[in-house]
Amino acid sequence: MSGRLSHDDRETLPDRGPSGPARYARHPSHDAPPMNVEIKHQRMANAIRALAMDGVERAKSGHPGMPMGMADVATVLFTRYLRFDPADPDWPDRDRFVLSAGHGSMLLYSVLYLLGVEDMTLDQIKRFRQLDSVTPGHPEHGLAAGIETTTGPLGQGLANAVGMALAERIMAARFGAAIVDHRTYVIASDGDLMEGISHEAISIAGHLRLNRLIVLFDDNGISIDGPLSLSESGDQIARFKAAGWNAARIDGHDADAVARAIEAAQQSDRPTLIACKTTIGYGAAKKAGTAAAHGSPLGEAEIAAARKNLGWDSPPFEIPTDIRDAWRIAGLRSSHAHKEWDQRLAALDSETRSEFERRVNGDLPPGLGPAIAAYKRRLADEAPKLATRKASEMALDEINAVVPETIGGSADLTGSNNTRSRDMTPITADDYSGRYVHWGVREHGMAAALNGMALHGGLIPYSGTFLTFSDYCRPAIRLAALMGVRVIFVMTHDSIGLGEDGPTHQPVEHLAALRAIPGLKVFRPADVTETAECWQLALESAGGPSLIALTRQNLPALRKEFLETNLCARGAYEIAPADGDAEVTIFATGSEVEIAVAAKALIEAAGHGARVVSVPCVELFEACSEEHRAGIIGEAPVRMAIEAAVRQGWDRFIGTDGIFIGMSGFGASAPYMPLYEKFGITAEAAAQAALARLQAPAQSTTADVREETRA
Ligand SMILES: Cc1ncc(C[n+]2csc(CCOP(=O)(O)OP(=O)(O)O)c2C)c(N)n1
C-alpha cells in the first residue's frame, strides 16, 4: 500500500494563498442554494467551528483552535468514512474514534451533537465545562455515548487507540470478519506526538502491523508556547515510517485530499499516519495560525470577524436547518451496515452468538467460580510454599482455561512476571489468534493500550512488569481508574524481598502511591490461596482496574483449610486469632503476613495474646461497613502494621501511635534475608516492639487511637 500514499513534503504543499479574510474566500454565504459538494462540505465544517468558538466563548474557557483547524478533517471522516450509528453508539462493530488531543473536546461534542447522538444535546453543548454536564473540559468516557475514552493527558489516547486496534484484530481472529471488522481512527496533535508514550505506542502498532489504525495528525505547527520550531525539529513522516507505518502529509483543509488519504489508509497493510497541515483557529481573523487560538476564548471581535470570514451568519448555537439535516443524514449512513451486521450476528449458531454477547457485555463465564473453588481445595491439601508470582501463574493456568477472553502479556519480563500461563501462544502481526502480547520494554504504552483493549470490549487484558516500574505506567493506571475499566496490572518483585537487584528495583513508596489512586484496587496476597482469591476479585471487578503485587521470594501457605468463601473479598480478615484475649493486633500484607504470624507466636510465648489480620486489599476493606471494619480492627491495646514499604496510609489501621515495621528509606542490594534483617523487618523485631509497648504504653489512650482511626 505504501505506494498509494505519496509522501508530500511541507515544501510541496499547495499554497494556502493570502492571509486574512481573503484566504477564506472560498466559503460563500450559506444562503446560496443549490449547494455544490464543496460548499456543502465547507458549511458542515463551519458548523463545528461555530459551535467550538461559541461554546468556548460561553464557557469563558476552553480550546477553540484545534476544533476550528481540524473541522474539515473531522467532517470528511465523520460524514463519509466513520462507520458509526448515532442511534446505537455502542454497536460492537462500530469504528472507534479517539480524540487523543482531548483539549479539542468541543470538536467531539460538536460532531456527536451534529450527527444526532441522543446524549449530546444542544443544551449540553451550551453547558460546556459546567458542573454535571456531559461536556467537561476534556472528554470523559462514560458521560456521553460516543466518547470512546477519556483523553486530555497527551499521548494517552493514541496509545489507547493502539489497544483498541489490537483488540479488534484479536476479536476478529476469534469471531470472524463477518462479526468483527472495524477501524480505529485517531485525531492526534503535536503534543500527542511529542510525548514519550507515543514512541512506545507507534512502535508496537507498527510491529504488530495494526493496519486498521489510522491517525489523523493535526499538523498545525503550533503548541502552547508558540511555533513548534521552539521545541521540535523532527520529521514525523520519517519517524512513523521508521516504525513500520505508512505516512503522508496532506493539506488538511482540502476535503478531497483528506478523503483520498483516508481511502488509501483503508487499503493499507500497515497503520497509517496522515499528517494534515492545518491552520489552528482556522477562520479567526488575527489569531488563526497562532498560539493565541490554542487555549482561550477568541473574544467577541475575533468571533465576529471569524463569522464573516467563514460566511457563517447564524447566531451562536444555531445551526441552519439544511446543514443540520445534512449532518443528520450523514449520521444515518451506517444504519444499513448496522442492520446487516445484526442479521449476520443473528445468523450465527446460538453458542457462538451468546459467547460473543457474553464477552462484549463483560460477563464472566459461569465456570470461573467452580474452577477457583476446586483449585483452592487442591491448594489446601498441598499447601505449597511458593513465591506469589508463581502462585499467580498457577492461578492463571486455572483461570485462563475457563475465561477465554483474558489476554496476557508482559513488558519484556515474562519469565519474571509469570504472566504467561500454560497454552498461551503469542499474538503476532501474522496471527492474532494467540492470547499473549510481548509488549517489549514499553510499560507506559502497554498500560495505556491495555486500557484501550478493555474499552474496546470483549477482552480482559492483564499484563506485567516490576512493581517499581508501576511509575512508568502510572498515568495510564490513573486513567484506567478514572474511566473505571477492567484492566489487571500484574506487578511482581513487590518489595526489598526481590533482593540483589537493589534499591533501583525495590519498590518502597509504590504501594502507598498506588493506594492513593481513587478507584484502583491494590491487591497484595500473602500466599497461594490469597493469590487465587485476589485474581478472582480482580476479574470480578468489572467496574475498575486492579493491581496485583506479587513476590519474587517464596512464601509458605498460610491458609491450610479449604473455604469456598473468598476471604479476601472484604479486604482484611483475621488470619490468625489470638490465643485468649488479644493484647496485640498485627496487620500485615503479602510477604509480611508470614513474619506477622511468627511474631504472634513469639508474643504469645511471652504470655500475651496476639492476633494477625491479613490485609490483601485496603480498598476493599475501606468499602466495608464501619461496624465490620471496627470488628476487624479490634480492641487490642497495641496495634502494629508490618509491610516492607513506607508507613504512609497505615495510621488508619494502627493510629498515629501504632507501631510500624517497614521501610523509611530506600533498600539495598543484597540477598533478601540479610535485607529484612538490616531493615528490621523480622518477627523478632516486631515481637520485641510489641512487648516493649505492652510494658510501656504510648502516651495516647487506645480509645483515642480508635477514634482517630475511624475518623
Ligand atoms: C501530558 C500533558 N502535558 C501537558 C498538557 C497541557 N497541554 C495541553 S495542549 C498542550 C500542547 C498544545 O499543542 P498541540 O498538541 O500542538 O495542540 P494545538 O495547540 O495544536 O491544539 C499542552 C502542553 C497535557 N494536556 N497533557
Image: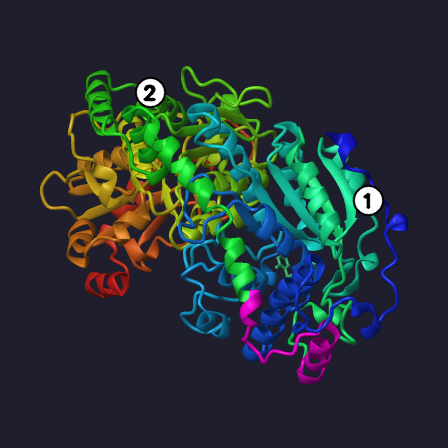
Residue 291, by quadrant, is bottom right
- Residue 500 versus residue 673: which sits nearer the camera? 500
Residue 542 within the magenta-colored segment of the rendering? no
Q: Is residue 111 visible?
A: no
Name above or below for residue 18 compared with residue 363. Answer: below
Residue at point 27%, 30% (across, down): 365
Name the quadrant of the N terminus.
top right
Between discs 1 and 2, the one toward the N terminus: 1
Q: Amino acid at mark 2?
A: Ala
At 25% from the left and 55% from the top, the residue drawn is 696
Q: Is residue 234 above or below residue 396?
A: below
Residue bearing the label numbered 2: 401
| Farthest residue, direction right | 11
Query: Pointer 1 and pointer 2: residues touching (CB < 8 Å)?
Result: no
Q: Which residues are magenta?
A: 299-323
Q: From what the image shows, is residue 621 above or below residue 309?
A: above
The kind of secondary structure element at disc 2 is: helix
Residue wearing tag 1? 235
- Give me the residue at 84% from left, 44% from top: 8
The image position of residue 370, as x and y in percent, is 20, 25
Quadrant containing ligand 1 reads: bottom right
Give the label on residue 166, or none: none
Mark 2, other Cα within 10 Å: few <14 / some 14–19 / many ≥20: some
